Image: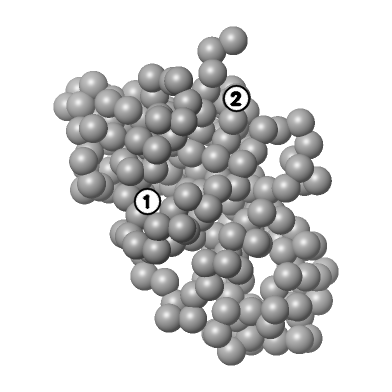
């Protein structure tokens, strides 16, 4: 069987069911042999909190994507970008994965907002040559725009892009950080279980993350 390597990146601050749901749909849709979940150290398109802790984000991501939650899935949570201690560009991570695996291209999942901005990423032409981009609409209203960009990328760059149909989990990391900040120690797992795995919830509580926005 042809080896297929996938890349699913993000800040994961914290990782939530929206992330894991999209990642598993991506895994199955692309029929991946191995999925790399890659927490970013310093993402080029997003500003991190001055109290950001890469160690905490890596630990939470490892819990969220553990074999306990996803048995029979070949998933590696990688610290490759976190160890760089600098701005992370997708092309550099893709080249790293291509050096590790004898594959022609890497399957890369990007959220719909990021999909629209692919031409503005570092080395877009090289990215389109080395990656197969998978995305999914955030809502029904965005499907038409995604299809339009997909067609343009295919015409202008000879790109390979696919749009998955999934039912998104409506939650953001910002919402969860604010929730923990507002509720502090009084926030029960039952109030978060549709957004977080229990081990991630326990980690946040034990480390007192986000309670004063110092996580």
Q: Quadrant of residue 163?
A: top left
Name the residue nearer the viewer: 172 or 207: 207
Where does the N terminus fall, quadrant-wise? top right
Q: Residue furthest left?
A: 156
Marks 1 & 2, CB-CB < 8 Å contact: no
Percent position (x, y) of residue 114? 36, 49
On the picture, is 185 further left or further right than 140?
right
> Which residue occupies 64% across, 79% down?
209
Percent position (x, y) of residue 138? 48, 48
Q: CA distance from mark 1 to mark 2?
A: 26 Å
Residue 211 visible somewhere in the drawing: yes
Q: Residues within 10 Å of mark 1 (few under 14, many from 20)?
A: some
Q: Which residue is mark 1?
A: 113
Q: Residue furthest bottom?
A: 212
> Which residue occupies 76% across, 78% down?
206
Mark in the foreground, 1 or 2 = 2
> Which residue occupies 23% across, 32% down?
126
In the rendered structure, find residue 33 and report the number of the disc placed on it.
2
Q: Residues within 10 Å of mark 2 (few under 14, many from 20)?
A: some
Residue 153 vs 7, above or below: the answer is above
Where does the C terminus fall, quadrant-wise? bottom right
Residue 47 vs 61, above or below: the answer is below
């Amino acid at each position: 069987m042809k080896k297929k390597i996938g890349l699913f990146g993000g800040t994961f601050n914290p990782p939530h069911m929206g992330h894991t749901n999209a990642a598993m749909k991506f895994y199955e849709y692309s029929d991946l042999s191995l999925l790399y979940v890659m927490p970013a150290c310093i993402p080029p398109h997003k500003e991190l909190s001055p109290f950001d802790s890469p160690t905490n984000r890596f630990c939470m991501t490892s819990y969220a994507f553990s074999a306990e939650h996803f048995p029979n899935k070949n998933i590696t949570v990688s610290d490759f970008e976190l160890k760089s201690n600098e701005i992370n560009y997708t092309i550099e991570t893709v080249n790293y994965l291509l050096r590790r695996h004898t594959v022609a291209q890497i399957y890369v999942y990007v959220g719909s907002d990021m999909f629209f901005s692919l031409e503005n990423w570092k080395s877009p032409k090289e990215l389109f040559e080395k990656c197969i981009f998978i995305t999914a609409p955030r809502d029904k209203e965005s499907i038409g725009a995604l299809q339009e960009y997909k067609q343009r990328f295919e015409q202008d760059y000879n790109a390979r892009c696919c749009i998955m149909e999934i039912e998104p989990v409506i939650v953001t990391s910002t919402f969860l950080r604010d929730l923990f900040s507002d509720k502090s120690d009084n926030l029960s797992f039952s109030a978060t279980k549709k957004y977080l795995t229990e081990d991630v919830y326990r980690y946040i509580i034990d480390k007192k993350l986000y309670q004063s926005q110092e996580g």
